[in-house]
Image (tube, rainbow, N blue to C red):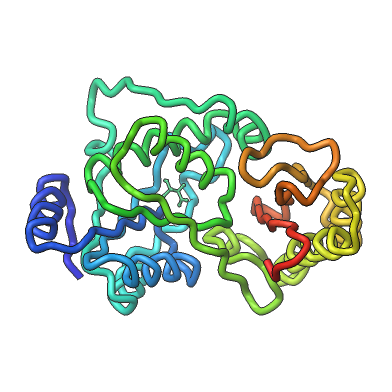
Amino acid sequence: MELLTDAQALTRWSRARRASGGGIGFVPTMGALHAGHIALIHAARQQCAHVVASIFVNPTQFGPNEDFSRYPRTLEADQAMLTAAGCDALYLPEVREIYPEGFQTRIQLPEISAGLCGAVRPGHFDGVALVVTILLNRVQPDVAFFGLKDYQQFLLIERLVTDLAMPLRVVGVPTVRESDGLAMSSRNRYLNPEERQRAGALYRALLAARDLRRAGEGSPELLEGVAREVLHAAGIERVEYVAVRAARTLLKVATVTDDEDPVMLLAVRLGSARLIDNMVLSREDGA
Ligand code: PAF
């Protein structure tokens, strides 16, 4: 795997790959990689001739009291995982390269950022939109891959790419789960063994809501209520949100109907970790 430590090297790499034919697939990450990230690399490998990942812990998407400084940095292990997964190149920019002196641009998607994680983490999605735009401009991929665990982020990036007429396709890759259903996340490392055991309740909460939906329940409040009960029974009290929304727009729905699949999204605090997960509550398939 080629290491690209500055923008010039990245541009040379991209130009040469483009000239040699075949599409470029891009997997942006903040490192601390796990099997969920590797699923993104595999998806890119399947769809594109050339695959480049980036690792950049983006300061603008962390709030002042969030975990930027302690966010896990595991570069050696990350490189080994990317190499084993068949990634061709890794872009590793410094903060000064992404945000050079004098930088002042801001990007906001006010509607999609307004609720859920956007309400709890003010400014978070502005930082995501900004860094993703810069990275996409730098890499100029044909396809970019993002995990559906970050469901709101995924919809935001789809919207951003459409609104700014960026010439690429955005692909969402299904969440990879541990054996008890916990969604893989770099932040799972913050959990102690007892918290880790309780964290399986997030998935069980989503399944309980899905089962109720499959039994015909259409009330968002009742679907949310059953999920909250599962979290409560596991001793998870710091629930930031449990919400049923329209899957394409994240708008609130008065009643769930068969016309549009709802998605349940949840966020909790467990120990020093903040965990999120989601599930589309379709009536038929095995989401
Ligand atoms: O999902 C992430 O890891 C980050 O939010 C992203 C998309 C790499 C932007 O920093």
Residue 256 to residue 45: above or below: above
Along the viewing direction, whichever of 226 and 257 lies nearer the viewer: 257
Along the viewing direction, whichever of 210 and 124 lies nearer the viewer: 210
Quick check: can you spot residue 235?
A: no
Q: Quadrant of the C terminus?
A: bottom right
Along the viewing direction, whichever of 203 and 188 lies nearer the viewer: 203
Could you say which quadrant of the image residue 157 lies in? top left
Number of dots carrying numbers: 0
Residue 208 to residue 8: above or below: below
Q: In which quarter of the image is the N terminus?
A: bottom left
Residue 4 in the image: x percent, y percent? 17, 56
Quick check: can you spot residue 172?
A: yes
Q: Residue drawn at (18%, 62%), measured in percent from left and top?
A: 3
Residue 55 to residue 159: above or below: below
Q: Position of 263 compared to 52: left or right?
A: right
Residue 92 in the image: x percent, y percent? 25, 53
Residue 124 to residue 26: above or below: above
Q: Residue drawn at (24%, 58%), measured in percent from left and top?
A: 24
Along the viewing direction, whichever of 256 and 206 lies nearer the viewer: 256
Could you say which quadrant of the image residue 58 lies in? top left
Q: Residue drawn at (51%, 39%), measured in percent from left and top?
A: 156
Q: Position of 235 compared to 162: left or right?
A: right
